[in-house]
Each structure stands twice: as C-alpha cells, then as structure tokens.
Amino acid sequence: MSAWHERRAHEIAGAVRTGAVSAVEVTRAFLERIDAVDGEVNAYTEVWRAEAEARAAAIDAKRDRGEALGALAGVPVALKALLCTTEGTTDCSSRMLKGFRSPYDATVVRRLRDADAVLPGKVNMDEFAMGSSTENSAIKKTRNPWNLDCVPGGSSGGSAASVAADECAFALGSDTGGSIRQPAALCGCVGVKPTYGRVSRYGLVAFASSLDQIGPLTKDVEDAALALNIICGRDPMDATSAAVPVPDFTASLTGEVKGLRIGLPKEYFTSQLGSEMREKVERAIAVLEEQGAETVEVSLPHTDHGVAVYYIISPAEASANLARFDGVRYGFRHPDAETVDDLYVLTKSDGFGTEVQRRIMLGTYVLSSGYYDAYYLKAQKVRALIRQDFDRAFAQCDVLVTPTSPTPAFRFGEKTDDPLEMYLSDIYTISANLAAIPGISVPCGLTSAGLPAGLQIMARHFDEATMLRVAHCYEQHRGFDPGKPPIARGAA
C-alpha cells in the first residue's frame, strides 16, 4: 500500500472517516513530504505546520465524539497565494503585499474548512497571477517535479507542482486565461476551470474580474469532482456567483461516453501544435472513440483573435483592480517617499514586478481617452464573437476536445525575453475564459523527454458534469499509468 502522501483525496477522506487512519497521521505524512522535497521543488511560500496539526487533531477529536465528518475529512489542501486566509499571509507572490494578513477567509477557504480539510499552507504563483511559468514570482523559483530545470507553468505553478510532487492531496488555483489548466498539463495533474460564476470569487485577490475563476488541481478526475462539490455554489458575498444548482459531480463519473458527440475544433490542430503533443492528443481522441463517442469537426473561427482580445481586456481590468495598491491603505509603502507623487511612483515602481507593470501600463493605455473605442471596445465585441463561436459549436457536439498546451514544459529563461512567445503558451486555454465556459486538463502521456502532455475538454456553460464524465472515461481507459515524476520517485 502506498504512503499516505501518495494517496488520492477521496481515499484519504474515506479512511479518516472510518478511523482506518487518523487525520494527524495523514497531516504529518504530508508535512514530512514537504520537508523532504520542497527544498528542491520550491512550491510552498508558507507552511502552517502547527496550525495544520492542530486542525487535524480537532478533526480526530470530532470523529472520536461520534460526530459526522465532512467530505474532505483530514485531506491536506494547498492554497494559491492569492486566496485570502486568516492564517498566514496573503501576498500574491508580490513584494507589494509582503506580510499582508487578511482579516477574513475567502469563501472557498471557508468551505474547505467546513468540509474538514486540513490547510498546510500557501503555494507560489506568478505575481498577481500574471504569467505562464511562475517565473514572475517575487518570492522564489518553483520547479517542475518532472524536470527541475523546467518551469511548472503558471500562474498556478506552485499549486500544480505541489500536487505533482505529492506535497498535498490537492490544491486550489485560479484561472484567468489558462492558469489552472496549463500548469496542470505541464506538471501531469488534473486541473479544472469551472464555468464563470460557478465558484465564488469572494476573497480572491482580483486580476481580471470578468475572467478570474477558482478551481482545483488534483491527482485524478474523481478528486476534481469531489473538490467541485465543496467549492461550487451561490455566494451572497459575490454578486457574480450564479444561482445555479450544484449537482453531485461524483455521480457523473460513470465511465461511459457512448453516444456523446466530441467536437474537434480545426483551429486547435494547426502547425502551432508540436508533433509529439499532436500524437498524444490524437491517441486520446481515439480512446474516446473506442469507448463509443462520436467525433465531429467543428470550427471556432475567431480563435486566432483570442490572445489579442485577452491581452486587451485582462490588462484593462488589472489596471483598475491594482490601482488600490498605492502605499496608502495597506501593503508595501516605499520608505523614501516624501511627497504624494513620490509615494505613488516609488511604491508602485518597487512594489510591482516587471510583468505586472507591463500589464498595468498596457491596460491603462487601452482605457485612455482616444484609445478606448479603438482597443477595449473592439476587444469586447470580438469577445462576444468568440462566445458565439462556442455556442454554435456546442449545437453540434456535447464537448470539445483539444490540446491544453502547444508544448510541454519549457526551460527556465527560455521565453522570458519574449513576452509574446510566453503569452502564446496559453493559446489553447484563453478562449474558454473569454467565453466563460468550463474546461479541464487531464494527463494524456509523456513526451520522449519524459515531460507530461495534457488533454483539454471544454463543455457548455454549467455542464461540468458532462465534462467530468468524458475526462473520467478517458482516464479509466487510456491504457497507461502516467506514473510519478522523478522527484516523487526519490530521484531528484
């Protein structure tokens, strides 16, 4: 039997509820794992050792009193550094918020606590979620457990790396343009971006408010469904959360796809897709066909405009959201400021990293007088066209299946000098955010260099159940075990 740090969340919760293992024993196994490997992976920015053990002991005491335990009983869940928590700090991996302590918990954090999860700490990310490699963190360099010379993806790179390295049972991340799905693909785990509005954003430090969505990164699809059961649902603290009933997502994991129609967008299978990645995705599609699914070619004709639209809308929203970090209210305040002008200029220049400054300036520009109509308004119109593309595609199929990333994990520094090249890392994931639909990435093999490839499945608004059903069927019948990364095999 595998060690507890290698077990799935649903296995851990079941064992803790029955008393087969204590929550304290599980928590200590994960803390020992963090001690053993995080010096090389660098996923965690904070480890809440005493708090996690105390929480686990309280869960065991609750069980000993005969009280029913929650669905995540004793399950260690890592949190991306932009989720507000009363424990530890909420710094968004930025100097701007170094040491900031939130006075409240994000709604998703509260729901995890209510489900009896254990929270071992915060994990690294691209500063304010702006990046595709986690190289933009002001805190540390998180490494990919499959190859320590490669990035884990971003912006939820710490979340993905911590799951891949068995440093948590699952993690929460956020996805604004692919920031859950892309690192999940690069680190060989499952990552879900729910429908916009399915999960409350209350307590999520905002990047782009019309695009951001919280979701889980897990070791398998069943854990993803379990996590969604807990974090989804209407929240009166978030006006954009939807009053849509939340089904039991685990009930959708039937292993059957017979009769389902799978759409293959021709715009996602072009020369931009590497040959090895294409081969892995095509083999995954064949597995679904073997299980009785029907494939049909569809078109999303405005796909090529997705990156441009995203990098107008998201910086514009970031420019507004990050204006609050001015050295006056909270967060970093430059010590040399003598005037109000100094306070703004010095604080923002030193508090924000290069990529964040780049996006703030871009967003401010496209919103400025004389340019709003030429850029921002036009981008919003094209965003509507992209959403219409998906509506038409889903009239022909039940889900869409595509690659998650055009390439496997790349080496540190490989794309940092070319922002456009870095932005294109999310070319297959951005459109789902623009259209507000759900998407999931599932491992679909290893390249010849031993790096994971990811299969993306997208569904209609609020139809995560069908998306999970297809993902689970593929996972059950793919015919291979993705295995563990070298660092998880003790070869780091």
Image: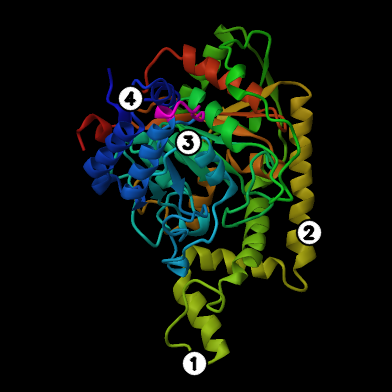
The residue positioned 33% from the left and 42% from the top of the image is 53
Q: Which residue is mark 3?
A: 116
User: Quarter holding the N terminus?
Assistant: top left
The residue positioned 47% from the left and 23% from the top of the image is 279
Q: Residues within 10 Å of mark 1 (few under 14, many from 20)?
A: few
Q: CA distance from mark 1 to mark 2?
A: 39 Å
**Majority secondary structure in the magenta region:** loop
Residue 164: % across, % down: 36, 35
Mark 3 or 4 closer to N-term?
4
Mark 1 or 3 closer to N-term?
3
| Mark 1 or mark 4, whichever is nearer to me | 4
| Quadrant assignment, res 291 | top right
Q: Which residues are magenta?
A: 63-71
Q: Residues within 10 Å of mark 2 (few under 14, many from 20)?
A: some
Residue 169: % across, % down: 40, 33
Q: CA distance from mark 3 to mark 2?
A: 45 Å
